[in-house]
Image (cartoon, rainbow, N blue to C red):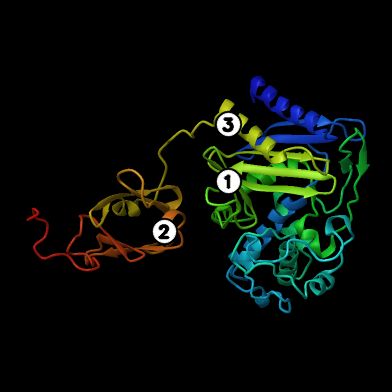
Amino acid sequence: MLPSTEAALLRRIATEQAAARVPSLVAAVVRDGELLWSGARGFVDGAAPDDDTQYRLGSITKTFVAVLVMRLRDEGRLDLNDPLDKHVPGTGFGSTTVGQLLSHTGGLTSESPGSWWERSPGGDWAALQASLARDALKNRPGSRFHYSNVGYGVLGELVARHRGKSWLDAVREEILAPLGLSRTTPHPEARHATGYAVHPFADLVLPEPSPDAGAMAPAGQLWSTVRDLARWTSFIGGDTADVLNPDTMAEMRAVAAVEDGDSWTSGYGLGLQLVRHHGRRLAGHTGSMPGFLACSLVDEKTGTGALMLANTTSGPALLATTIDLLATADEQEPKLPAEWQPSEVDRSLLDLTGLWHWGPTPFHLRLLPGGLFDLSPARGGGRASRFRPLGPDEWLGLDGYYAGETLRVGRAADGTPSYLDLATFIFTRTPYDPAAPVPGGVDAEGWRPAH
């Protein structure tokens, strides 16, 4: 990046590290899968940390677990509307759905009963299940957002039962190895930072424990580095390689629950935290474990992401600082649009493109790369969606009002496209074409002056 941009980024983390008295922190900016900048402040064992120094990720671990669950969904092994009992029978909250667990709307207690799990050695699934036998539901499932670490312990068990191996082995084989995340591990490996609590009234530190969380580990066990987390940040932004369908990742980034009221600034998707800041929507996750804080966010529209890792229990405003890094990069060095150039498309689809009408309202149907269509109002805002091919003359809505709905092409006897049927809405080449099956029919006298 430009020296002026790098100076601004470094100043931001230097200010935060000094003001919040953080033993060490590392940060980075990524764009379109490339690590553009990284910086560090403080010391780890007497030397500055670097891109390969491990820190604990805390709840960013949940994003890995969520991807495993979505892979199972894409394979047809489960549905997000399935009750938990279908996959992990015998709990006292089996009517809670898989989707609700992913989005923290299942009503489960936030923490596992007993000793604070983040600072205590964890038991196995049987012990966790037994501890949840009574009073595990704190809210009616689906009624509200209520962050639940327990819910991800449960999802880890769901993954294990489907894969026939631990959730961690599934993460290693299905995510870490294919993406080359060789420095993301369940326990610290050299070189790594030590987690500290900083005395509130003196410049002293206290080492924090980092036990294995057992059945609660899917909620916050993993450790990682700047370099590995940069790759994962790009993954959340849509650079999913062969690990996950990009459409599935887009589904995970969609708002499932709002955390802070009517005019939302924070919410949750399927395993992802969502932040709305100055007109942009960011996706990723924060993390907190005793001795460590972490944050990773990406803007899917610009492809720019930022991350921070710190070895302190509390103090720095990691979310705000990460947002500042991302915003600084995009403001000082905005991404240029890709150069347009002609490309090969399925020319047999060209006869579907152009002007269509929903009633009297004109729409344009445009052919996009990859055989996708974009259906948008010809004038200004309105119901717009993209569609991907399902089969002959059928497309599935990907976003907007028609997400999940099927667009079907109706053809005349000679094969000419004559109308589009989209969730019972009939689009015709001319407004209210009497030759098309317009619901309610078309007045026989046709268009005429008002009386």
Residue at 56% from the left image edge and 58% from the top image edge: 256
Kind of residue at badge 1: Thr
Kind of residue at badge 3: Asp
Tag 3: Cα neighbours inside 10 Å, few (<14), some, or many (≥20)? some
Residue linked to disc 2: 402
Residue at 80% from the left image edge and 59% from the top image edge: 217
Residue linked to disc 1: 265
Q: In what element is the residue under mark 1?
A: loop
Q: In what element is the residue under mark 3?
A: helix
**Residue 184 in view in this figure:** no
The outermost residue toward the front is 201
Q: In what element is the residue under mark 2?
A: helix
Residue linked to disc 3: 330
Q: CA distance from mark 2 to mark 3?
A: 31 Å
Q: Quadrant of residue 305?
A: top right
| Residue sitting nearer the eye, 290 or 364 | 290
* Percent x, y of residue 309: 77, 40
* Percent x, y of residue 179: 70, 49
Q: CA distance from mark 2 to mark 1?
A: 24 Å
Q: Which mark is residue 433?
A: none
Kind of residue at badge 2: Tyr
